[in-house]
Amino acid sequence: MPTILIADDEPNLRLLVAATLAAEDCEIVEAGDGDQAWALLQQHRPQVAILDIQMPGRSGLDLIRAIRSDPTLRSTKVIALTSKARPTDIAAGLAAGFDIYLTKPFLPVELLTTIEQALNGGIRGETA
C-alpha cells in the first residue's frame, strides 16, 4: 500500500485532498507546516508527496530541494499544489525538482489522476 504525504498549512485543503484519496488503497499522512512535513518524509518515506509552496517553517521549495538531495527520498514523486500560479513560479517549481505542478483551485478528479500518474511512474516536469 503506497504512502502519500499531504503537506499544507490549510486544514480544509488537507481534508479535501484526503477525502479525494479516500477510495484509494493508500496510507495518508498529513503535515500542517514544512518542518512537520520534513519529519514525516523522513519517517514514512512516502511514494508521493503533495506539497504547498507557501507554508510555515520550510517552504515547499525548501522541501523539494531537500528531497532531491536525499538519496533515500530522491525517488519520491512530488506534486506541487499551490496558489502560486505565475509562469515564473511554475518554472521555478519545476526547476527545483517538482514532478508535477498543480495550481489552486483544482478539480479533485484532476488531482486523483495526477496522483495515479505519479504512482505509476508519472512524467517529470508536467504542469496541470
Image: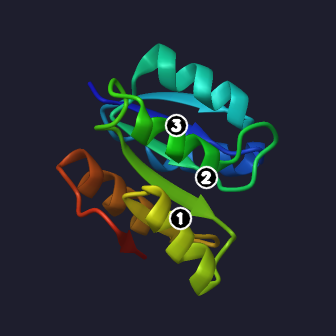
- Residue at x-position 25% and y-position 57%: 117
Residue 9 higher or lower than 39, as above or below: below
- Residue at x-position 50% and y-position 68%: 102
Mark 2–mark 1 contact, CB under 8 Å?
yes
Q: Which residue is mark 2?
A: 61
In this rendering, would 20 be left or right of 83? Answer: left
The image's colour scheme reads: rainbow
Amino acid under disc 2: Leu
Q: Residue furthest front?
A: 69
In this rendering, would 106 be left or right of 27? Answer: right
In this rendering, would 77 be left or right of 38? Answer: left
Q: Which residue is mark 1?
A: 93
Residue 39 in the image: state x and y as whole percent: 60, 20
Real-space Cα distance between discs 2 and 1?
7 Å
Q: Residue furthest top?
A: 43
Q: Nearer the viewer, residue 63 or 69?
A: 69
Task: Evaluate whether residue 65 shows in this view.
Answer: yes
Residue 89 in the image: state x and y as whole percent: 62, 74
- Residue at x-position 33% and y-position 40%: 24
Q: Residues within 10 Å of mark 2 (few under 14, many from 20)?
A: many
Q: Residues within 10 Å of mark 3 (few under 14, many from 20)?
A: some
Task: Evaluate whether residue 22 shows in this view.
Answer: no
Q: Which mark is residue 66?
A: 3
Amino acid under disc 3: Ala
Residue 46 higher or lower than 78, as above or below: above
Which numbered disc, 2 or 1, marks the residue that appears first in the sequence? 2
SS class, disc 1: helix
